Image: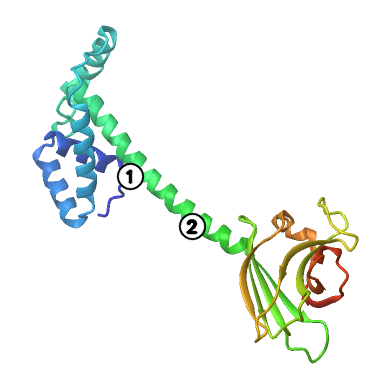
Amino acid sequence: MTWSMASEHLQFLIAGYVLGNLDPDEAAEFEQLLIDQPAIATEVDRMQKALELSSASPEIPPPAHLRSAILAAQTPHTASAPRSSVRRSFGWNRAMNVAAAVAIVALGINNYRLRQALQVSQTETRRLATLVYALQATQSGNAASATVEIDPNRLEAVLTVQNLPPLPPGKVYALWTVVKQYAPVTRDTKNAILTEVFNVDAQGTITQSIAVPSVYRSANLVSNVAVTIEDAAAPQNHQGKPVMLANL
C-alpha cells in the first residue's frame, strides 16, 4: 500500500518511531514503509529535529481538571478495548511535542504544495501577459518589419526592427502607442503617446530594450502601434505619417 505523506496514520507512525513508542506490529509496518518509500526518512529527520528543539522545555503538567477528565475518559476504554487498539501513554510534554511535530510536518507539506502552485501560476501569468505587436511597412514593396514584445507587469519591451532604411542626419524614427478615445491617459492630438525614438544601423536593423507606457497594462486601450519619421530635435511634434503599423 502506498501512503500519502499527509496520512494521519503515517504521521502517527513517524511520531511513534521518533519517540520509540511503537509496538512490534507497528514497528514492522513502519520499517516496511521506509523500505517501500525512502522519502519518509526525510519526514522522520524533520520531526526528530522539531522534537530536539522542544526537548529543552520543562515538563508542563496539565491543569488538574483536564488531567482528571483525560484519565476518566480513558479508564473504561482501556479495560474493554482490544490490545491492538491500546496505545502506550505519552508524557504530557511529549504528547504536546508530537502534536507540534506533526503540525510542522503537515505545514511543510502544504507550504511545498503552495509554492509549486504559485510557481505554476506565475509562469502561466507571465506567458499569458506577454503582448507581441507585429508591424509591417505601410508602402507596398517595402520589406521592413518590426516586433514589439511587451511585459505589461514590468512595463518593459524589446523592439526588434529589420530592413528599415537608415535615415539622414537630423531625422529619427519614432515609435508611437496609439490609444483609444476613452483611454484615461495623456496623448497628443493624434491619440498617440511617444514611446521611443530610435535609428537603425547600416543594415536597417536594431534590437533594444525600451520602456512602455502604463496603458499596456490594459491592452484593450491600445488601438495600434506605429512608426513615423520625425525631426530629431522635436520628435514629439508628431509631424510624420506612419511608415509602419501593427497588424491589429
Q: Furthest-right residue in view?
A: 189
Where is the N terminus found, in terms of image quarters?
bottom left
Residue type indicated by callout 1: Ala
Q: Quadrant of residue 35?
A: bottom left
Foreground label between 2 and 1: 2
Disc 2 to disc 1, C-alpha distance = 22 Å
Q: Name the residue: 73% across, 88% down.
A: 143
Report helix, strand or loop for mark 2: helix
Q: Is residue 69 above or below residue 135?
A: above
Q: Is residue 148 above or below residue 73?
A: below
Q: Furthest-top residue in view?
A: 64
Q: Is residue 113 left or right of residue 1?
A: right
Image x and y of residue 159, in percent: 65, 71
Q: In this view, does 64 lie to the left or right of 125?
A: left
Query: Badge 1 local density, few (<14 within 10 Å), some, or many (20+)?
Result: some
Q: Name the residue: 14% across, 28% down.
A: 88
- Which mark is on residue 181? none
* Residue at image mark 1: 6
Q: Quadrant of residue 78?
A: top left
Image x and y of residue 89, in percent: 16, 24
Report helix, strand or loop for mark 1: loop
Image x and y of residue 206, in percent: 64, 77
Image x and y of residue 138, in percent: 82, 82
- Which mark is on residue 120? 2
Residue type indicated by callout 2: Val
In-front residue for pair 15/137: 137
Q: In which quarter of the image is residue 215?
A: bottom right
